[in-house]
Amino acid sequence: QGQVRESGGGSVQSGESLTLSCEAAGYTFSTYCMGWFRQTPGKEREGVATIDSIGRTRYTDSVKGRFTISQDSAKNVVYLQMSSLKPEDTAMYYCAADSGICTSYNGRQTLDSADFAYWGQGTQVTVSS
């Protein structure tokens, strides 16, 4: 039984950086799509960034230029490097995984949580002003 595990959350000041890690342990996908999502109370889960096994990435507009998603395929680990953090980045961050390369809709790689079957428990990121 596989497990998706996030780590690296915490509390930082506005403008600081934080790196989240996600390990998809126990999965043996030949191809895969992994992503980071975030959610605040009362709001829908939002796709932040996705990456697949052929290295394609996509970011939601609000984090472009500030966040970087990367991977260590040998370890089944995906990272989310977050810089220039803002209070509005405060959320519970979830990692998700699915087999197969990321789905594309009209040429744009998915940021849709419905495309992911395996989820971690989440890690809290809090940015104070």
Image (spheres, grey):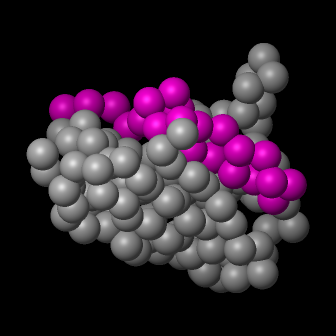
The quadrant in which residue 77 appears is bottom right
- Farthest left residue? 129
Asked if residue 12 lies left or right of residue 81, the reply is left
Q: Residue sitting at 25 percent across and 37 percent down?
A: 88
Q: Residue sitting at 66 percent across and 38 percent down?
A: 58
Q: Is residue 116 in view? A: no
Image spot of residue 59 (x, y percent): 58, 37
Q: Residue sitting at 63 percent across and 46 percent down?
A: 50
Image spot of residue 42 (x, y percent): 19, 32
Image spot of residue 60 (x, y percent): 53, 32
The quadrant in which residue 28 appears is bottom right
Q: Which residues are magenta?
A: 42-64
- Quadrant for the C terminus, please: top left
Asked if residue 58 lies left or right of residue 29, the reply is left
Is 123 one of the magenta-colored residues? no
- The residue nearer to you, when weighing 95 against 59, is 59
- Farthest top residue? 106
Asked if residue 113 lies left or right of residue 85, the reply is right
Counting every numbered tag in the picture gives 0
Q: Is residue 101 in view? A: yes
- The residue nearer to you, when weighing 25 against 76, is 76
- Quadrant for the N terminus, please: bottom right
